[in-house]
Amino acid sequence: MKHKQTLAMLLAAAMVLSMPLGAYADEMKPVQDEQAMMELYGTPDYEAPVLHSISVDKETVKPGETLTFTLNVTDDVSGLDYIEINLINEATGKTDWIRDSVTVNENDEYTLTYTVPKDEAVGTLRVDEVSLSDALGRYRFYYSKTNEHADQYLPNEISVEIVESASEDKEAPVLHDVSLSDTTVSAPGKLMLTLNVSDDVSGVDHASAIFINRQTNKEVKGSWNALREEPVVSGDIKLELTTTQYDGSGTYELDTIYLTDDNGHRQYYYSEQYENQKPTLPKELSFTVTNESGEDVTGPVLKGISIDKTEVEALSEVILTLDVEDDLSGYQSAIVDVVNRKNDRRINLCHSSHDNPNEVIIHISEWEPTGLFEVECVSLFDKNNNLSTYYTENLPNQVSFLVKNVDENDTSGDIFTSTNNANLVEDIQDMAKGSTAHIYYGNGATISADVFEAIKGQDKTIALKSDGIEWIFNGQDVTDENIKKIDLTTSIEAKWNSDSDAAEGIDWEQNALILSFAENGKLPAPATIRIKADWVFKDAVGTENLYVYYYDNTTKEYVQVAADLTITKDEYLEFTIDHNSDFVITKGELKEKEEPSYPDPNPDVPQPDPDVPPVTPDHKPSRPGSSDGNNSANSSNGSGVVNYESEKPDPADKQAVKAYNFWQDAKSKIRKTAEGKTLRLNVPKEITNLPASVMETLRKENVSLRLNWNGKTITIPAGKAQPKQKLRIYWTMQTLEKLYNA
């Protein structure tokens, strides 16, 4: 793999040398293409693995036999980490998957084996999807040509014929009766649940049951496996139910029973609480818990976060120390997610240490690109499995660290640092003439007056970089009278999301973006502002013939700043400003609203429309929307209210339309479900996100939602729906599983 790394570095350098230079071409400073800059200075991994071919060793197979798949895969830098193959039986629609971690193979060939289940039906078993990931977590997906709207197809189609059935076992287990050893139990304490079951051939080999306190949503679970015993063809199975000393008093009702037989046939039985879910339990059961010592229903409290270092080289680690308190059972563990908002790189599921639950170690790969990481989410668990979750906006303090992936042989004199750097001023003072300080900043950051003093009158540049926004100052333009501390808080929003006065005077039919800065007034020097033109940006105003205006709050007039701009090759909009206020970006010249003004068709607080019709190919959304729910700059207004219109998909994207209509139907069902009751949904495998409007509907209706997705069950209890979050349009299923199933 080393020859590949060398080749990648040479190609990256060649790309940088051959690309057109931006606004600072004459001085060769600063490098305008961020990705090229990072490739020039280090060996970060930007490319996902590539699938060249796939084959299988058999054309026909019987249930119980094994297939071997061979794949030719290459990766540029960090190397292939895992392969997943998704299979589908075209006769039944049944899906299955193979996933395997891999090691370096000099021939670039990898093999995965799959044993066809004994109960698999006769039909064509087809490879439906192949997903690849490298060691840095870069993904690439390949789909069968049966998927008309895929963006990348398999290099060749693979299918195998299942020619005969090898098993007589066709039926799932049957639950005939349930009973409890007692109807009351103390905490802590135990009682026994008896299941009377039968199975046609192979016998029941697993059973589980869940009881729920519907007032607190706390659960008591029991399970049984035929490990050293024979599967039960007909008879009783006993499950032990255990209450802890912190379980609350109250009534726990039998919610769900799950059975599987030895050939993998499975069956759920549901409480009558679940509307339209069949089959139901043979009878409703419950028991009462008494707890005289007191219950623990409150999750741990995060008091603060500290970090051992704020700048690290690639291939290193950062240690977070959490200050946590818990009321009764005691704090047990934590999970932390961090994000690089510049490129949306995430390092998820960083677990606390077994030896010290207050410490969370974040491992930095040797291929991690340069950038500033911020703590995005902290999940805390106590010993009674109560969960507390903190997101960026409600953390007790902001924590960030800069990852540097820099070539030791670089002689440019540029530095890569962050606003966390205690020696920032000194480092800038030590910079050579003509150099650039690339300073990464996070939420709520400021840049001190001392930084501008350090570059005043000198050919030194500071480039302040964050989530899609960059400020570039040259010291030769800095004047004494304007030197001051600058608040770097910046937001960019679609016109209909913004509460800025600048949005009010624009003709309704004209799309526009509102760029709002903190009230800094006159800047220490003219600043080149660079705004990342993401999908939402492009959909709102396009990529060329762009105009920029600032809004004069005193005169209520729009003053032109730049005209007929085109985004740069690295997809940024660039213009220069000398002060901070609210700015407007339009396609073509700005059209002001005529008098009398048109009524505003949008309420101040957008809410999902209960009667919104399904999207069809004939319906085109009137407003831009985004399918990226985590980092879109246009997804919410300044108050953090989600613009649910942005959930609407492109009507040409049939898969997105299908998902949108599924969730619109789900919201309708939630509204029809009685308060405190549970709605169960079977989520198609291809749907991986839950829209924010669904979460908000759950919160308002106080309904419990149980999702069956990809072989997993995710329960969002009534009263536990997540609050609105700025810039979040979707919740991924993986995030929900982490929040509610940990």
Image: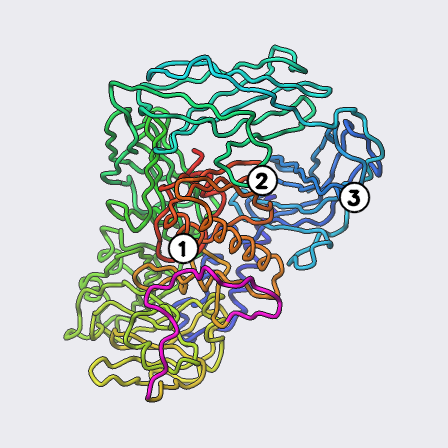
- How is colour applied across the structure in the image? rainbow
Q: Along the line of sight, which residue is nearer the eye, 330 or 470?
A: 330
Q: Earlier in the sequence, mark 3 or mark 2?
A: 3
The magenta stretch is: 596-621
Q: Residue at x 42, y 24 (%)?
A: 220
Q: Residue at x 82, y 39 (%)?
A: 161
Give the alpha-carbon distance from disc 1 to disc 3, as whole Å: 40 Å
Q: Is residue 306 above or below residue 452?
A: above
Task: Count residues near mark 2 (Cα–Cα under 10 Å), then give few for <14, some for 14-19, many for 20+.
Answer: some
Look at mark 1 in the image and give the residue it sits on. 728
Q: Is residue 253 above or below residue 511?
A: above
Task: Count residues near mark 1 (Cα–Cα under 10 Å), then give few for <14, some for 14-19, many for 20+.
Answer: many
Q: Secondary structure at mark 3?
A: strand
Look at mark 2 in the image and give the residue it sits on. 710
Q: Position of residue 606 (x, y in %)?
A: 37, 64
Look at mark 3 in the image and give the residue it sits on. 159
Indicate the quadrant where residue 150 lies: bottom right
Q: Position of residue 20 (x, y in %)?
A: 51, 73
Q: Residue at x 39, y 68 (%)?
A: 30
Kind of residue sitting beneath label 3: Ser
In which quadrant is the C terminus drawn?
Answer: top left
Residue 704 visible in rendering: yes
Q: Secondary structure at mark 1?
A: loop
Dominant secondary structure of the residues highlighted in magenta in the image: loop
Left or right: where does residue 323 sit relative to residue 493?
A: left
Q: Earlier in the sequence, mark 1 or mark 3?
A: 3
Q: Along the line of sight, which residue is nearer the eye, 667 or 64?
A: 667
Q: Residue furthest front?
A: 283
Kind of residue sitting beneath label 2: Asn
